[in-house]
Image (cartoon, rainbow, N blue to C red):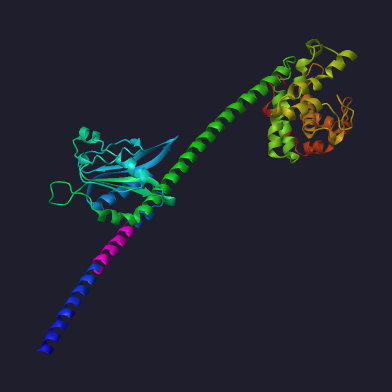
Amino acid sequence: MAVVGRLDDDLRRNRLFLFFRLLRCGTLFAHSLQGVRRVSVVQQFLEFIEESPDQSVRAVSQRVLHKCRELTGAEAGSVFMLHRRGRARELTAVSVQNDVVRAPGRAFSLPADLFSIAGYVALTGDTVFIEDAYAIPKDRPYRFNPSFDRHTGFRTRSILTFALKGVGGRSIGVVQLINRRLPGCPDPLPFLREHEEMIAPVNHLVGRALERAATTERLRERNRALAKERRRVAELQEETERAFMVSVHLLAKAAELHDEDTGNHILRVNEYSYALARWAGCPEEFCAEIRFSAALHDVGKMSVDQAILRKKGRLDEREMAEMKRHPVYGHEILIASDRLKMAADIALCHHEQWAGTGYPNGLAGEAIPLSARIVAVADCYDALRSKRPYKPAFPHERTMAILTQGDDRITPERHFDPRLLSLLVQNQDEFARIWESLRDGCSGDD
């Protein structure tokens, strides 16, 4: 009998041992299922976050909210992003969903303070469970705002609100879920701690995805603003450039009001000078600048006594000395503007000669600015082609003969840079074309 009793005791102990083993296995299995479920949730969030890495904040938040509602059975919800406005902080709704009534179509904001549920969660990082929004215990710092319910007829009851965490664990936004529903249950049910545990593993993933999307949107907005500003600056520069060119042209024309026979002289000198500069291998910036600066070569004549400018016949010694001051006068007019420095050099030096026999300073060779040497050739070619009170208009062939062989007034090797003169000879058809395209109606070859 004693042996039978011991066998019964052993059997009971084995049964009890097996019971606890099974209980432990069941618990482990349950935990394993929860773990698998959490992994599945994480995988689902990862898939739609990584599916389109360049999604907007609104697109990410819409999908996040839909997934959170799907997992918890919430019939409504909102995603808020935390922003700083000066010293204050506020929460802006970037996604609002509601299966019962129409959600607000426009974005709205609320202060990020401890008095609202979302504000409290954003500032503290705590998760808040509320069974009945209209029966929040008085010892809680926050209160429910019923204005949306009153306006729409919706009835808020259970609420789950949790913070979205970004880099460093700081709150960057809030998800608020409303009214957990189960099929067959007429009334909303409270949210469960299980829901928080389910969503917690993806909190940082979602938070950082939204943070990245917000940063990308700010950069895009900044780039759009910069592009808009660049376009505005470019438009202003174009307007300024047009106004500048008009001013240059008017100034150049004003300098020639004393001479009714000059016509398109300044336009032609611009084009001759531009062509010579290109043939000489000058940088494009130089070529572009000389194309308008050349027009101002005689601007100093505005400061010369008009009686001298309009005098028929030869000038006496005093009058000639005054006429030879026009390069200095032109330089004084133009040098005040940084934009007209080349024009000032041209005005001062376009009557200097390669041999040092010109005026007003007797500069020689490469001491004369290249821009002035170019305009000297261009100006002389056009003067020879044009009709003047003291001479007829010469055809291209005779003009080139004078420039290369000289006459009683011009000695080429003394007057001009030989390299520039050689370039003109090689490309003389272009000068002839410019003359024909810009010739004056009253001018013609003899």
Relative depth, front residue between 288 and 313: 288
Measured as percent of width and height from the top left, residue 39 is found at 32, 62
Work out whether residue 209 or residue 166 is closer to the camera in this orientation and state it.
Answer: 166
Q: Position of residue 308 (x, y in %)?
A: 82, 12
Among the 4 quarters of the image, the one containing residue 352: top right
Residue at 25% across / 56% down in the picture?
194
Residue sticking out furthest to the front: 2
The span picked out in magenta is 28-45
Q: Residue 105 at what x, y percent from top left?
A: 29, 36
Q: Is residue 25 above or below residue 82?
A: below
Query: Is residue 239 part of the magenta span, yes or no?
Result: no
Quarter where residue 40 is shown? bottom left
Residue depicted at x 42% and y 38%? 84
| Percent coordinates x, y for residue 57 in the rendering | 38, 45
Is residue 52 visible in this depiction of the protein?
Answer: yes
| Residue 81 image-quadrant placement | top left
Q: Residue at x 29, y 56 (%)?
A: 197
